[in-house]
């Protein structure tokens, strides 16, 4: 294994499901199948079978894994991989999916401070809303800073290419022309305008930015969709492939729910997070 005078401190976390309910009964949902990577690296894996909160949500099985090591390849750095998989997800018999996979891989350089980031392996399998198939097209290169080789010289939230992609996502979500033709109410809700305002996406203006690995969705269902965000009657708000990026960390949540109707609360499914740091900085 290659040697280096610098020390890398790994950081990776994964969970299959978590959150809380306020209705029909107040209930905390502790993180399911949680897994964290040692700062020294290594490997960890956990798996569980069925989980159920009757009448609200369930899954058939889930697993998480984390790993971190110095690459054996010449001139390559410290590699971290984090994966969260949920199989047979069911929310209110309305939101269903055969499989959700969140996967993040980062590689920190031997010299330098900012990692290369990929989401290869991330996917939705057979996602449906009210029995209607939803075809999801992913942008797994959203954090690619147009590098053919080497490592970034700055973080994503300071990179003009990344910020332009996020701003374009926000503009798409706020354009009534992008609503499916079958939607009668074509007004954009205030909460979408406030959360996804493209004018707020500027380098140095925010400590973190919410974007999505979802490029587009195809399929009609009861409700409305704004890019990767759905409003579903009797369920609430559904967020697909939500990516939270700050100066050096990446958190991917494949399905986040703001429940509101038969039940209320907030839950997240298939969550992966990776960052890490190297000392001394260079």
Image: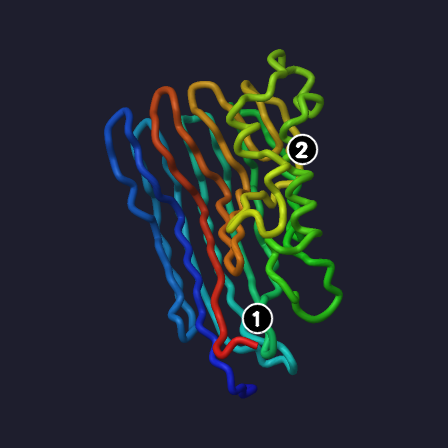
* Furthest residue toward top: 184
Give how far across and how far down residue 140 sits, in percent.
64, 51
Badge 2 local density, few (<14 within 10 Å), some, or many (20+)? Answer: some
Looking at this view, is 155 or 262 the one in front?
Answer: 155
Describe the element under mark 1 as helix, strand or loop.
loop
Image quadrant holding the N terminus, namely: bottom right
Image quadrant holding the C terminus, namely: bottom right
Looking at this view, is 245 or 224 the one in front?
Answer: 245
Q: What residue is shown at x 58% (from left), y 43% (from top)? A: 212
Q: Is residue 249 above or below residue 218?
A: below
> Which quadrant of the structure image shows residue 47?
bottom left
Of callouts 1 and 2, the N-terminal one: 1
Badge 1 local density, few (<14 within 10 Å), some, or many (20+)? Answer: many
Q: Is residue 236 above or below residue 66?
A: above
Give how far across and how far down residue 137 sits, in percent.
66, 40
Give how far across and how far down residue 131 sits, in percent.
53, 25
Looking at this view, is 209 or 41 the one in front?
Answer: 209
Q: Which residue is mark 2?
A: 171
Give how far across and how far down residue 279 sits, in percent.
48, 77
> Which quadrant of the structure image shows residue 76?
bottom right
Q: Is residue 50 left or right of residue 12?
A: left
Q: Which residue is mark 1?
A: 113
CB within 8 Å, label 1 to label 2: no
Q: What residue is shown at x 40% (from left), y 28% (from top)? A: 259
Q: What residue is shown at x 34% (from left), y 40% (from top)? A: 19
* Furthest residue toward left: 26
Describe the element under mark 2 as helix, strand or loop.
helix
Q: Is residue 103 above or below residue 262?
A: below
Image color mode: rainbow
């Amino acid at each position: 294994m290659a040697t280096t005078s610098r020390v890398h401190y790994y950081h990776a976390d994964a969970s299959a499901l978590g959150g809380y309910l306020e209705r029909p009964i107040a209930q905390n949902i502790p993180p399911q199948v949680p897994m964290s990577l040692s700062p020294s690296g290594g490997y960890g894996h956990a798996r569980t079978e069925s989980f159920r909160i009757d009448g609200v949500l369930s899954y058939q099985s889930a697993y998480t894994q984390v790993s971190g090591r110095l690459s054996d390849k010449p001139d390559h750095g410290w590699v971290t991989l984090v994966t969260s998989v949920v199989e047979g997800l069911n929310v209110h018999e309305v939101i269903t999916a055969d499989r959700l996979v969140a996967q993040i891989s980062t590689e920190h350089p031997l010299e330098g401070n900012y990692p290369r980031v990929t989401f290869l392996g991330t996917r939705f399998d057979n996602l449906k809303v009210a029995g209607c198939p939803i075809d999801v097209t992913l942008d797994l290169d959203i954090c690619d800073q147009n590098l053919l080789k080497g490592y970034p010289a700055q973080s994503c939230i300071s990179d003009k290419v990344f910020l332009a992609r996020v701003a374009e996502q926000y503009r798409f979500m706020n354009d009534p022309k992008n609503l499916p033709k079958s939607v009668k109410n074509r007004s954009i809700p205030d909460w979408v305008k406030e959360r996804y305002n493209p004018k707020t996406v500027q380098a140095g203006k925010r400590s973190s930015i919410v974007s999505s690995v979802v490029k587009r969705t195809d399929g009609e269902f009861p409700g409305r969709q704004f890019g990767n965000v759905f409003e579903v009657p009797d369920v609430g708000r559904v967020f697909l492939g939500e990516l939270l990026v700050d100066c050096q960390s990446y958190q991917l949540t494949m399905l986040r729910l703001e429940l509101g109707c038969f039940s209320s609360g907030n839950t997240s499914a298939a969550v992966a997070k990776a960052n890490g740091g190297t000392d001394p900085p260079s």
